[in-house]
Image (cartoon, grey):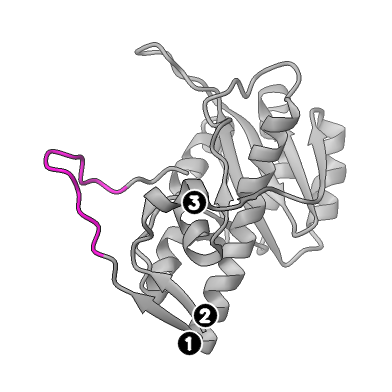
Amino acid sequence: MKTIYNKFDKTKIADLPLVSFPGRIVIIDNEQDCIKATSYLQQFDILGIDTETRPSFHKGIYHKVALLQISTEDEAFLFRLNQTGLPQSVIALLESNIKKIGLSLRDDIHMMTQRHSFTPNNFIDLQQIAGDIGIEDKALQTLYANLFHLKISKSQRLSNWEAKVLTRAQQLYATTDAWACINLYKEIMRLKQTHDYELIINTIDVPVGADHSPSSQD
């Protein structure tokens, strides 16, 4: 039986073993490769999804979404939207009946529609289903630590996602987030079906004056 917590103690995450995407990474930076990649991805029943946007460190300056990560259990595709835009082949995948698993998907969808409008279909947000087994955590790193006792690195979150060449560290960061969503979804659904878990209520004190709004980001 698995032990999970309504709220995982974030202070314990730093000591957990690090996990990263173990499969093949494919970078997509032109429309022809978008067509090939999305045609391949259409055969799957479930995909992990995430986006990255170049951070802005100046007030009033914003950037459009730069990267769309779509992962299977074994392969991950990094669509460089800052170079391709949001082509029709990608839109068709986003509008398909394939289950697309992510976290804080409203934000991701909003960012992508700023490049091109589309009608999202069959997107499943982990923040909404985690509560079905009593988990209140909202961040991807905390959810993963809670369910798998492994740590997802967030060291590349504020890196330049519009760089001419993505570093290996950026590639692993981006693919891990999308791939992790599949793992989390399958485990949550397994636990919902089997009830093979014990939920521990962990009362975590919030410092006086701290922001009580839940984090929606990874």
Above or below, 156 against 189 in this view is above
Q: Position of residue 130 (x, y in %)?
A: 43, 67
**What residue appears at the point 55 percent right and 38 percent down from the top-left corner?**
117
**104 or 36, which lies in front?**
104
Q: Position of residue 124 (x, y in %)?
A: 52, 62
Q: Compute the Cα span from label 1 to label 3.
A: 22 Å
Q: Compute the Cα span from label 2 to label 3.
A: 18 Å
Magenta segment's dominant SS is loop
Q: Which residue is mark 1?
A: 195
Q: Which residue is mark 2?
A: 191
Q: Assess disc 1: are there few (<14), some (14-19) or many (≥20) residues with their C-alpha within 10 Å of its C-alpha.
A: few
Give residue 153's quadrant in the image.
top right
Label 3 secondary element: helix
Q: Looking at this view, name the residue that lies furthest to the front.
A: 15
Left-right relation of 130 to 178: left
Residue type (three-letter) at the residue carrying disc 3: Leu
Residue type (three-letter) at the residue carrying disc 2: Leu
Q: Which residues are magenta?
A: 203-214
Q: Is residue 40 visible?
A: yes
- The numbered mark at residue 140 is 3
Instruction: Confirm or deny contact between disc 1 and disc 2 (CB under 8 A).
Output: yes
Above or below, 98 against 54 in this view is below
